[in-house]
Amino acid sequence: MKNATLPPSSYVVLGLLAVYGPMTPYDLKKSIDGSVGYFWSFPRAQLYVEPERLKELGLLTEEREPEGRRRRTYSIAEEGRATLRLRPYHLDALNHTAISLIRTGGEEKEVEALFRRAIETAPYYYKSLHNYGLFERQRGNRAEARRLFGSAIEHNPDHASSYFCRGMLAWSGGDAAMAIDDFRQAKGLGYDVGKALRSERVSAENDARLAEFFR
């Protein structure tokens, strides 16, 4: 498999084609501008070079208009899909695209599909589980959010943010003891629980049960 020297931009192109289907370089540019482009800056002209390079490596296929502008449309090849399954950049591209859609008011079904694709590709990748948990929490699906945060912790017991977020669900659900246990886990991993509680607008500084997180 010819993936040893592929840069992150290659995996973004492969990931977008895997999710959205065939695209022209201009389509890729528009998709990136509306998604990972908010978080990642790179020369957009690269999108007119990268697909051709990936095609030469056998990771993409190309269809070209026989007349007129002779536009090129690229699709992901089976070897491209296999390459994605072996590398983490595809997962990050899916996560960043989903997060961008959340922030810009994108369709919830599309966001859900992106997270599900990421988790199906790599069920062990804790960031996908955590981000999907944040999305479900935002939608009010507390039980599912808790399950996802728990899965993220299972796959990475050092992920402090997942402990904190699971603790917040417990706190808002009235289970203070469970919440404090998770907050302690997060704090023990170096997470600033007091600052996070303030950002969540929790009236906690005067609550004796949470005093330890503000010392």
Image (cartoon, rainbow, N blue to C red):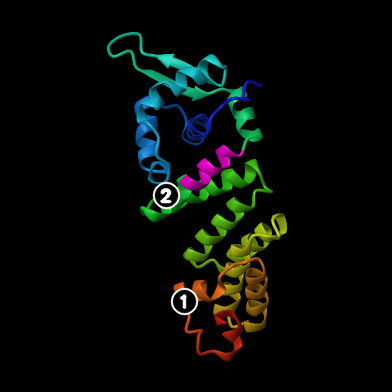
In 3D space, how far apart are the residues under numbered discs 1 and 2 (Cα atoms)?
24 Å
Residue bearing the label numbered 1 = 198
Q: Secondary structure at mark 1?
A: helix
**In the image, what residue occupies the spot 37% across and 31% down?**
43
Q: Is residue 37 magenta?
A: no
Residue bearing the label numbered 2 = 100
Could you tell me what secondary structure mostly forms the magenta stretch? helix
The boundaries of the magenta stretch are 88-96
Kind of residue at disc 1 = Arg
**Is residue 193 found left or right of 138 in the rendered image?**
right
Mark 1: give few (<14), some (14-19) or many (20+) Cα within 10 Å.
Answer: few
Kind of residue at disc 2 = Ser
Q: Is residue 24 visible?
A: no
Image quarter in which the C terminus is found: bottom right
**In the image, what residue occupies the spot 42% across and 54% down?**
102
Q: Is residue 92 visible?
A: yes
Nearer to us in this view, 53 or 143: 53
Q: Position of residue 67 (x, y in %)?
A: 31, 9
